[in-house]
Image (cartoon, rainbow, N blue to C red):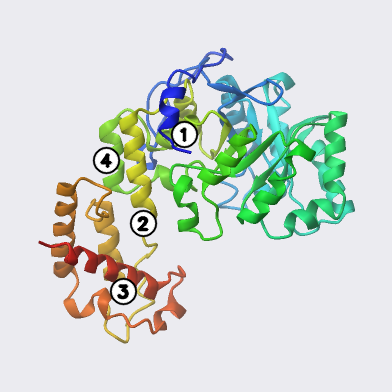
Amino acid sequence: MERREFLKSMAGGLAAGAAIAAGCRNPNAVQAEGFAASEVPTGSMTYRQDTHGDPVSLLGFGMMRLPVEGGGSGREHPESPLDQTMINRQVDYAIEHGVNYFDTSPVYCQGRSEAATGIALARHPRSKWNIATKMSNFQTFTREASLQMYEQSFRSLQVDTIDYYLLHSLGSPGGFKERFLDNGMLDFLLEEREKGRIRNLGWSFHGVQEEFDLVLSMHEQCHWDFVQIQMNYVDWRYAHELNSRNVNAEYLYTELDRRAIPVIIMEPLLGGRLATLNEHTASQLKAMAPERSLASWAFRYLGMYPRVLTSLSGMSYLEHLEDNVRTHSPMQPLGEAEMQLLERVADEFAHFPAIPCTGCQYCMPCPYGLDIPGIFSFYNKSLSEGNIASQGTVEQREFRRARRAYLTAYDQSIARLRQADHCIGCGECLRHCPQAIAIPRQMHKIEDYTNQLKDTLV
């Protein structure tokens, strides 16, 4: 499926929803993290319709990174108590600005997310929000334990009906069979949907394509109401390249679209990395749309796909929530030039990722004299400054400029005898790297790239 096909069909199809409540404030935005600062509109949220025809906000609130007392999120500080006052405030703000989809799980925030989410949502009329939670029976998947988890979700969330219930994180070979078929839990959940305790039944996917195809093949029997997948402008074509266990979102979305199954998006910002792009990439996006945040590009990209029901964002800080509401109120489709720019960004992001070296020097000294931290620092700096690009991803003149800048600076920064081409792959450094960087592989990658640039000199 070609992304440009959506440009014509979707340019006028992103309708805004009805007003919810008035009253917003100027955000204390964190532009350094890829978010913008401007007035947040009310009454302009964009909605999509689920299989029942009910409106769902295109922005969904993921309750996995809830704030904790003292600052930060429960994922970063698992030992800290959740800040219920701040959680309530964020939920209030979200609902006031039209967000009506909240996603949690029995295992989020060390098992505390459902209860905290239930407390915050119970303060609002039930008609104002939809709750999604999951059967997260990863460790113990006996029928008894699974049933206990299921019933506890109702108590923790303080509800009689769960709007969207997911078979959580399918994708491991045999996992679907063991967790939901052998113990009869799938039949049970289908019956619960018939009774109305579950309004929509679906599943989330992380894993191998064979398992995705298996579960999807049961659509005629199960009538899945939605499926949740990882999708963003990098994972569309490069998910498998970044992680061999992942499946490209292009395949996942296309298969779901063929069956008219609504799609819920997780990891729209690729774990936050698409909101913290390198200096060179960020400057290109800002030059084209200076008033927009880096994060907004990722969400606007997802809004181009009509089968997307909602995109989940784990918003630990109110500033993130404000910026995301701004992007979706209403959602503005990408133009042709913007889509082309994102395609180039995705290609460079996938083929030239930053190396997570902290410069700790634990890998040194190298027995063959390489300046390992220096090489990685030079590479990352070149990436940030836009001096790394593959031929064909940028105009030829820009490629020649980047090639010349890279080769000149490499020899100036790293002595010839200490460059990447002297790595023999002995692996001595691997035992000492706290970041678990595959140092010899990265050295060979840098060597190959450098040689390619030299081969193109005329």
Q: Which residue is mark 4?
A: 283
Q: Which mark is residue 372?
A: 3
Marks 4/1 in contact by CB < 8 Å: the verdict is no
Mark 1 vs mark 2, CA separation in Å: 22 Å
Instruction: Classify 10 Å Cα crowding around label 1: few (below 14), some (14-19), many (20 and above).
Output: many
Is 368 placed above or below 357 here?
A: below
Location of residue 124 (image quadrant) = top right
Q: Check disc 3 and report its element: helix, strand or loop.
A: helix
Among the two numbered marks 3 and 1 on one chain, the one whose residue lies closer to the N terminus:
1
User: Which is nearer the eye, 422 or 395?
Assistant: 395
Marks 3/1 in contact by CB < 8 Å: the verdict is no
Identify the residue shown where x is 60% and y is 35%.
Answer: 258
Q: Tag 4: residue type?
A: Ser
Q: Which residue is mark 2?
A: 351
Q: Which residue is mark 1?
A: 299
Q: Tag 2: residue type?
A: His
Q: Position of residue 48 (x, y in %)?
A: 59, 23
Mark 4 vs mark 1, CA separation in Å: 18 Å
Is 350 placed above or below 26 here?
A: below
Q: Tag 1: residue type?
A: Phe
Q: Tag 3: residue type?
A: Ile
Q: Do we see residue 226 in this rendering?
A: yes
Mark 2 vs mark 3, CA separation in Å: 20 Å
User: Which is nearer the eye, 190 or 112?
Assistant: 190
Among the two numbered marks 4 and 1 on one chain, the one whose residue lies closer to the N terminus:
4
Mark 3 vs mark 1, foreground winner is 1
Q: Check disc 1 and report its element: helix, strand or loop.
A: helix
Location of residue 261 (image quadrant) = top right
Instruction: Classify 10 Å Cα crowding around label 4: few (below 14), some (14-19), many (20 and above).
Output: some
Q: Quadrant of the C terminus?
A: bottom left
Q: Position of residue 230 (x, y in %)?
A: 55, 45
Q: Position of residue 353 (x, y in %)?
A: 37, 57
